[in-house]
Image: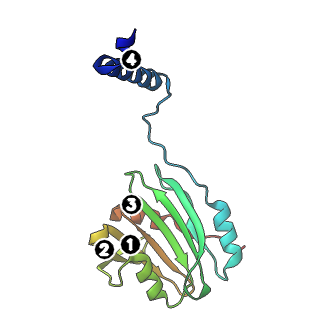
Amino acid sequence: MRRFTEGFYGYAVALLVCLAGAAVFLMITPQSREEHIPRREYSITVANFSHDVPYRVWAPRQDPAGWVPNSNRIAKGENGAQVLYLGYATAKRQHAMFIQSDERPAAAFAARMANRDKAVGTQQIGGVAWEQRYREDKNQRTLVRFLPDVTLVVTGTADWPELAELAGLLQQRPQA
């Protein structure tokens, strides 16, 4: 009996027992090969934001088809301004985020959100011109719309058509 607990044979038997135990564990453990993106409902965050700001809040009237809202938060921007962030995993599984604030100066806010201060063009979405910005090293595309009381930003690694889809779904919510 001693030969199975010493030397090479003892090592080989112990290794086989460990491998057999790991194989049994892997066979009985439930596994899922499906992608799971956590869904984060944002309606309460938007409602809370609308109570805290002096302007009518913008939000998507519906989520784009196949997109998953996966983050939302309200944060303090520069000069104490409130900033609303709504994040998505797009249908192509890229990242897109809608951001809005009345932070001043608006150009500095937009530059910070886009990681770029220069426009590369404009894009018509729903009959409205949005400024395009692109930062190549981060693969970040951004659409910016300056309004008198708020700045709207749609940004992320998503392509221009996906960002335009989100921007096209934005609408002002009723005053809270």
In the rendering, which numbered label is found on residue 162? 3
Query: Which image quadrant: the C terminus?
Result: bottom right
Which sits in the foreground, 26 or 96?
26
Q: Is residue 174 visible?
A: no
Mark 1 and mark 3: span between their CA atoms? 11 Å
Question: Could you say whether the residue bearing mark 2 is in a helix, strand or loop?
Answer: strand
In the rendering, which numbered label is found on residue 5? 4
Give the x, y percent position of residue 53: 66, 80
Q: Mark 2 near mark 4, Cβ–Cβ under 8 Å?
A: no
What amino acid is found at the position of numbered circle 3 in the picture?
Answer: Glu
Query: Which image quadrant: the N terminus?
Result: top left
Give the residue pinned by disc 1. 142
Q: Is residue 171 depicted above or below 105 in this figure?
A: above
Upstream in sequence: badge 2 or badge 4:
4
Upstream in sequence: badge 1 or badge 4:
4
What amino acid is found at the position of numbered circle 1 in the picture?
Answer: Thr
Label 4 Cα neighbours within 10 Å, binned few <14 / some 14-19 / many ≥20: few
Residue pictured at 38% horizontal, 17% vertical:
5
Mark 1 and mark 4: span between their CA atoms? 66 Å
Residue 15 located left or right of residue 61: left
Q: Nearer the viewer, mark 4 or mark 3?
A: 4
Question: Could you say whether the residue bearing mark 4 is in a helix, strand or loop?
Answer: loop
In the rendering, which numbered label is found on residue 109? none
Label 3 Cα neighbours within 10 Å, binned few <14 / some 14-19 / many ≥20: many
